[in-house]
Every structure is written in C-alpha cells, then in structure tokens.
Amino acid sequence: MIRYYPAVIEKGTEGYGVIFPDLPGCVSAGDTVQEAARNAEEALATWLDLSTEHGDAIPEPGNLDTTPDWLGDIDIAARILVRCETKSRSVRVNITLPEDLLQAVDRYAERHGFSRSGVLAQAVRERIRA
C-alpha cells in the first residue's frame, strides 16, 4: 500500500533536519533542503521496516497542513510529503551466508541501531531498486 507521510524540514546551524511528526524517532538530515528531502525517504523506509519487524503498530499519516504544537519553536524551511510503501507482515526464512559476511552485517546493524533482518531487508530493497 502506498502512503504519504508529512515531514517538516528544519533549518539548522549546519544544514537541514527532517522530522516526521507522526513517527517518533524517525528523523533525517542533509546539507541542503533537497538533500534532506531525498534522505527522508530512506529514513522513512527504514523506520517502517524496523517497526514492522518488531510488530509495532504503524500510525496513519497525519495532515501536511497542520503542525503539532511541539514543533512550534523550530525554523521550518519546508513541509513535504514522503512516499512509502507499507509492507506486509514479516515471514521467517532460513538463509545461508558466508560467516564473514554475516559478521559484517551484524557489526553494521549494531553500529547503526538496526537488526540483522532490517539490514538484510533494506539491502535487498536497494538492490532491487537499482
């Protein structure tokens, strides 16, 4: 299912940050407004993947025209809609990988706060898109 989540791009001291008011902890950034907007799509996809993997409820997208009160003190550079495709439920699979590759996946996941499954799912999605 295709959804569009509202995001707010905030002007910071060293670039731009992206905040998704409907999705706690889903943030992104970039040196320019355009880069921040592009990076927002990846942040949203990753947030949704991890939430789905952990069985968390996915909130419905809010309204782009309303800004929550808690965002009142930021310097808003832009409001955007970020497209995503919500996934179906996760299915457990058994795969075989070289041990050193699996260790590299686990190190990457730990450094970036992801799970092994989340890293592998995102890598597959990126490869398929390419």
Image (cartoon, rainbow, N blue to C red):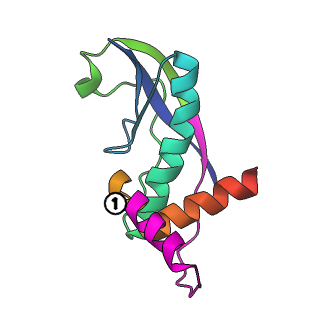
Q: Give 20 or 18, whichever is nearer the viewer.
A: 18
In the figure, 54 relative to 24: above or below? below
Q: Residues within 10 Å of mark 1 (few under 14, many from 20)?
A: few
Q: Position of residue 64 (x, y in %)?
A: 49, 28
Displayed quadrant of residue 1: bottom right
The residue depicted at 50 percent of the width and 79 percent of the height is: 99
- How many marks the image carries: the answer is 1
Q: Residue furthest front?
A: 100
Q: Position of residue 19 (x, y in %)?
A: 38, 31
Considering the numbered disc 1 on the image, is that residue within a helix, a strand or a loop?
A: helix
Q: Is residue 89 left or right of residue 126?
A: left
The residue depicted at 59 percent of the width and 84 percent of the height is: 95
In the figure, 90 relative to 62: above or below? below
In magenta, the rendered stretch is: 82-108
Q: Is residue 122 left or right of residue 22?
A: right
The residue beneath circle 1 is 110
The residue depicted at 57 percent of the width and 58 percent of the height is: 122
Q: Position of residue 32 (x, y in %)?
A: 52, 16
Q: Residue furthest bottom?
A: 94
In the figure, 51 relative to 18: above or below? below
Displayed quadrant of residue 57: bottom left
Q: Give 96 or 61, whichever is nearer the viewer.
A: 96
In the figure, 114 relative to 88: above or below? above
Query: What amino acid is at disc 1?
Result: Glu
Q: Give 9 or 115, whichever is nearer the viewer.
A: 115
The residue depicted at 53 percent of the width and 34 percent of the height is: 39
Q: Is residue 7 magenta?
A: no
